[in-house]
Image (cartoon, rainbow, N blue to C red):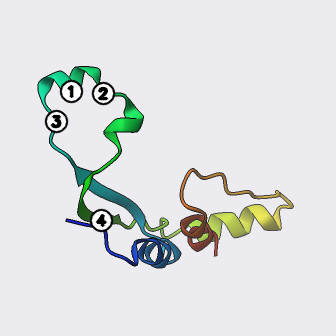
Amino acid sequence: MEAPSNYKELLELYSIKGFRILALAYKYITEEEYHKINRNDSEKNLNFLGFLLFLNPLKTDSNKVILSLINSKINCKIISGDNINTTIDVGV
């Protein structure tokens, strides 16, 4: 199965909505190839399976706590390994 032609647009759409996204793909290799293949080659010519979307909403009292910190003159920052659009959704 090929990745959808609008793959990047879908990633952007879901990340803006705050989803964490995993793309799933596979390819068949022999046991011999498995022992010899490097990461770069293992990630080429994959068969796209689909996306897994996860929501991890903030706890209900998070906004209140962050507001309390800001009111106490504490400069709050978000440090995230997520997609920038997901991080922005969490911070807004």
Look at the numbered discs 2 and 3 and tell me whether their residues touch, using CB distance below 8 Å: yes
User: Residue at horizontal 19%, vertical 65%?
Assistant: 1
Q: Residues within 10 Å of mark 3 (few under 14, many from 20)?
A: few
3D distance between C-alphas at marks 1 and 4? 26 Å
User: Residue at horizontal 55%, vertical 61%?
Assistant: 83
3D distance between C-alphas at marks 2 and 4? 25 Å
Residue annotated with mark 3: 29
Query: Which structural element holds mark 4?
Result: strand
Q: Nearer the viewer, residue 56 or 48?
A: 48
Look at the numbered discs 1 and 2 and tell me whether their residues touch, using CB distance below 8 Å: yes
Amino acid marked by disc 2: Ile
Looking at the rendering, in which quadrant would you find the C terminus?
bottom right
Amino acid marked by disc 1: Glu
Q: Residues within 10 Å of mark 1 (few under 14, many from 20)?
A: few
Query: Does label 2 or label 3 sit earlier along the sequence?
Result: 3
Position of 86 compared to 36: left or right? right
